[in-house]
C-alpha cells in the first residue's frame, strides 16, 4: 500500500494512487530481493533492497548526482520513461563510483 501521511500513527493511503495502480513487473530491477550485492563491485553483499548501493559507495557519488538519483527514484513509478530516467541515474552513479575508485578515492 502506498501511503500519503500518518494520522494518529497509522498510515493513510494516498488518495490519488490506489494500490497496484501502474505496476509493471517489467520495470522491476532484476534480481532485487530483500538484500542484494552492491552493483559497483566493491564486494559488499548485503545491501538492503531499497538502497541503490552500499553506504560507502553512495558517499563516493557526487552530491548533485545523488540529488538527481533521489529525484528520479521518487518518480520512478510514474511510467516507463520515468523508470528509464531512474535507471540512467543509477548507471551514472555506478560509473561515478567506479571512476572515483580508479582515481584512488
Image: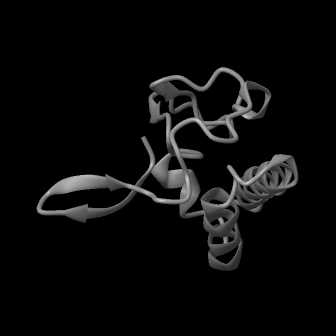
Q: Nearer the viewer, residue 28 or 54?
A: 28
Question: Can you say whether 99 is above or below 26 in the image?
Answer: below
Question: Can you say whether 31 is above or below 12 in the image?
Answer: above
| Residue 6 at x, y percent in the picture | 25, 62
Q: Nearer the viewer, residue 30 or 7?
A: 7
Q: Nearer the viewer, residue 103 or 88?
A: 88
Residue 48 falls in image quadrant:
top left
Name the residue: 47% across, 59% down. Answer: 15
Seen in the image, is 22 located left or right of residue 5? right
Seen in the image, is 42 located left or right of residue 33? right
Name the residue: 65% across, 64% down. Answer: 61
| Residue 71 at x, y percent in the picture | 65, 69
Question: Can you say whether 61 is above or below 80 in the image?
Answer: below
- Whether residue 105 is visible: no
Q: Exactly how many numbered labels are in the figure?
A: 0
Residue 92 falls in image quadrant:
bottom right
Furthest toward the bottom, the residue is: 64
Which quarter of the image is occupied by the N terminus?
A: top left
| Residue 91 at x, y percent in the picture | 80, 49
Q: Nearer the viewer, residue 17 or 9?
A: 17
| Residue 19 at x, y percent in the picture | 51, 39
Question: Can you say whether 8 is above or below 25 in the image?
Answer: below
Amino acid at each position: 500500500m502506498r501511503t500519503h501521511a500518518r494520522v494518529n500513527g497509522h498510515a493513510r493511503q494516498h488518495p490519488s494512487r490506489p494500490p497496484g495502480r501502474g505496476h509493471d513487473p517489467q520495470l522491476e530491477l532484476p534480481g532485487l530481493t530483500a538484500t542484494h550485492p552492491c552493483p559497483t563491485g566493491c564486494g559488499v553483499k548485503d545491501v538492503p533492497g531499497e538502497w541503490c548501493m552500499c553506504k560507502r559507495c553512495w558517499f563516493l557519488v557526487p552530491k548533485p548526482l545523488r540529488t538527481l538519483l533521489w529525484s528520479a527514484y521518487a518518480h520512478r513509478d510514474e511510467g516507463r520513461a520515468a523508470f528509464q530516467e531512474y535507471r540512467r541515474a543509477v548507471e551514472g552513479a555506478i560509473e561515478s563510483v567506479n571512476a572515483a575508485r580508479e582515481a584512488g578515492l
